[in-house]
Amino acid sequence: MTQPDTLAQLLTAISTGEVSPDLALKKLKYLAYEPVGDFAKIDHHRTLRTGFPEVIWGPGKTPKQMIEIFKTMEAQADCVIATRIEPEVFAQLQPALPQLQYFDKARICSTTPLPETSKHPGQMGIVSAGTADQAVAEEAAVVATLWGYEVTRFWDVGVAGIHRLLSCRDEIASMDVLIVVAGMEGALASVVAGLVDCPVIAVPTSIGYGASFNGLAPLLTMLNSCAPGIGVVNIDNGFGAAMLAGQILRTAVQLQTSQSEKSE
């Protein structure tokens, strides 16, 4: 842990009673980061502050940098995730990190395999318009599963053949939060939001012909949706959608716990 003098002062203050344990925990949330060479600072306490750990963004980093970051993070984290990792990059990482798992459809590396069971309550559904959108949808699905959420996939149910969506309408409506991934004109998110009573997170993708402007058209469609209850993340941002969905489910649990404690 870095900033040892600050930490020592805090521990001393706790031992003398100058700082309460609750206040110390709040201070610790903003204390720790660890430098890696001269190119990164690892935020070990992000989980304490936000509920979710830091994740490695792959593009723009050299394999050597990522190996050092992985090793530093793995020393204090149960599961370290890197997104947007191409197969040729994974091939360069694996010799130094033999434990590394690779999920090719999602382009994600993880220091642990997918868990066999979920550890958090709530049902997260991920709805993908077309097969070409599945890379972004899989990014959301794999990240959420690695974080311990139960994920149900609804693939290739776009509005061009809306009967495909309607055939699984009841199961989709049973989810606690939905991530809807669509390119082209992005209409799927509005349709789904008009059928369910849970939060809908819309993810525009860069899939489409020229007038889709690499995802700008579905982004604008989703932002201009007349269906209420839709939150929109950036183009191709499956990771961000998984983060938001997890925050929604986690907050719901916190509210239930708080209400239960008040009623006792």
Image (tube, rainbow, N blue to C red):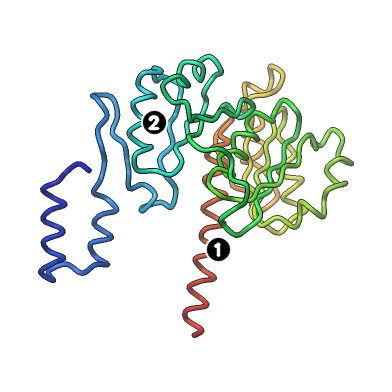
Q: Position of residue 167 (x, y in %)?
A: 88, 46
Q: Residue at x 59, y 30 (%)?
A: 236
Please name whichever residue, 61 or 87, is drawn nearer the observer in this view of the structure. Answer: 87
Name the disc covering residue 70, or none: 2
Q: Residue at x 36, y 53 (%)?
A: 48
Marks 1 and 2, the one that precedes in the sequence: 2
In this picture, residue 191 sits left or right of residue 9: right
Contact check, label 1 and label 2, Cβ < 8 Å = no
Asked which quadrant contains residue 128, the reply is top right
Amino acid under disc 1? Ala
When the figure is inspected, residue 207 is found, relative to residue 153, above or below; the finding is above
Label 2: state its secondary structure: helix
Label 1: state its secondary structure: helix
Q: Residues within 10 Å of mark 1 (few under 14, many from 20)?
A: some
Name the disc covering residue 252, or none: 1
In this figure, what is the number of numbered marks? 2
When the figure is inspected, residue 143 is found, relative to residue 217, above or below; the finding is below
Tell us which disc is closer to us: 1 or 2: 2
Q: Residues within 10 Å of mark 2 (few under 14, many from 20)?
A: many
Q: Position of residue 215 (x, y in %)?
A: 62, 26
Please name whichever residue, 215 or 87, is drawn nearer the observer in this view of the structure. Answer: 87
Please name whichever residue, 100 or 215, is drawn nearer the observer in this view of the structure. Answer: 100
| Residue occupying the far bottom of the picture | 264
Which quarter shows the N terminus?
A: top left
Q: Position of residue 62 (x, y in %)?
A: 39, 17
The residues tagged by marks 1 and 2 sit, at their Cα atoms, a distance apart of 32 Å
Amino acid under disc 2? Phe
Name the disc covering residue 156, or none: none
Please name whichever residue, 30 or 90, is drawn nearer the observer in this view of the structure. Answer: 90
